[in-house]
Image (cartoon, rainbow, N blue to C red):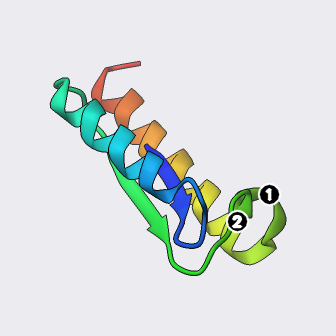
Amino acid sequence: MFTVGGADPLLDDSQFMAARWQAAGNLAQLDVWPECAHGFTNSAPGTGRAAWGRIAGWLTARLDAAGA
């Protein structure tokens, strides 16, 4: 799972890395959070909490699918 803010200077890098990850045959999801800056998951309480919830849900689903 790739999570990035729409105003993050690393947005292009995150998009590229997610696409490369998928091209290599891996499961990838890219979440772009509009108007969020770099590090928003730690500095924007409401939005950051929502992003961490999506990340946790995605990881839980992958672990469940793997039978872990």
Q: Quadrant of the N terminus?
A: top left
Q: Could you say which quadrant of the image residue 53 lies in? A: bottom right
Give the x, y percent position of residue 3: 51, 53
Three-letter residue code for mark 1: Asn
Q: Secondary structure at mark 1?
A: helix
Q: Would residue 3 appear left or right of 37 to someone viewing this image?
A: left
Instruction: Residue at 68% x, 68% y: name it.
Output: 37
Instruction: Residue at 17% x, 32% y: name it.
Output: 23
Give the x, y percent position of residue 15: 37, 51
Establish if 19 lies above or below 47: above
Tell me whether the residue at label 2 lies in contact with that at label 1, contact meaning CB atoms closer than 8 angstroms: yes
Q: Could you say which quadrant of the image residue 22 lies in? A: top left
Q: Secondary structure at mark 2?
A: helix
Determine which of the numbered discs, if any, sits on residue 60 in the image. none
Mark 2 vs 1, N-terminal side: 1
Instruction: Residue at 36% x, 33% y: name it.
Output: 62
Q: Quadrant of the C terminus?
A: top left
Three-letter residue code for mark 2: Gly
Determine which of the numbered discs, if any, sits on residue 48 in the image. 2
The residue that disc 1 covers is 42
Q: Would residue 49 appear left or right of 34 to someone viewing this image?
A: right
Establish if 61 lies above or below 50: above
Q: Could you say which quadrant of the image residue 46 lies in? A: bottom right
